[in-house]
Image (cartoon, grey):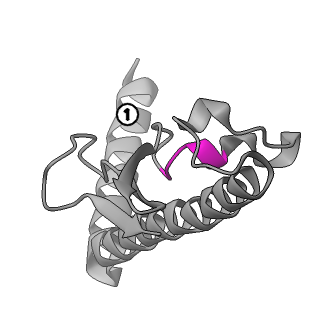
Amino acid sequence: MKFRGLLVILLMVAVIWAVMHILKVGGTAKIKKDVETFSRAKVMLTETNFKTLSRAVSNYVATQGELPAGLEDLSMSLPITTGKQDGWGRVIRYEQTGGGAFLLTSAGPDGRFGTKDDIAKNY
């Protein structure tokens, strides 16, 4: 019984030491940096999907003579079917803005349209 108690105490000391070491070495700074890098990657993926969608819309216009009513009208091959989503896995909003132009919008990290973190691009 005494041996188990000693093992528990040693394990607790090891865990406390490990946590203190991580904090001392800058573990929280690394985690924060990793989160920021991951967030930038999601923005970049969204921008890449905007480009993919704009090409698909251009192809649609070339074959149909007009803008599609919605993204569901676009036929996209299998490898790029996720191009209709932003980096957070949400559907990208498509709006015709007149004169053959259109706007693509992602709700951004918060998932709500109309906030300052939205990502939008006119074409």
Percent position (x, y) of residue 106?
A: 37, 51
Whether residue 105 is visible here, answered yes or no, is no
84 shown above or below 115: above
| Front residue (pair 10, 76) | 76
Q: For the residue labelled by badge 1, is the local secondary structure a helix, a strand or a loop?
A: helix
Using a 10 Å C-alpha cutoff, classify the residue at mark 1 as few (fewer than 14 neighbours), some (14 to 19) or many (20 or more): few
Q: Is the stretch drawn in magenta largely helix, strand or loop?
A: loop
**Which residue type does callout 1 highlight?**
Val
Picture quarter containing residue 52?
bottom right
Percent position (x, y) of residue 5?
A: 35, 28
Q: Residue beneath label 1, please?
A: 8
57 shown above or below 72: below
Percent position (x, y) of residue 30?
A: 38, 76
Q: Quadrant of the N terminus?
A: top left
Give the extent of the magenta segment: 83-87
Whether residue 78 is visible here, answered yes or no, is yes
Tell which residue pokes out farthest to the top in this image: 1
| Front residue (pair 32, 81) | 81
Is 91 part of what is drawn in magenta?
A: no
Picture quarter containing residue 36?
bottom left
Percent position (x, y) of residue 53?
A: 62, 56
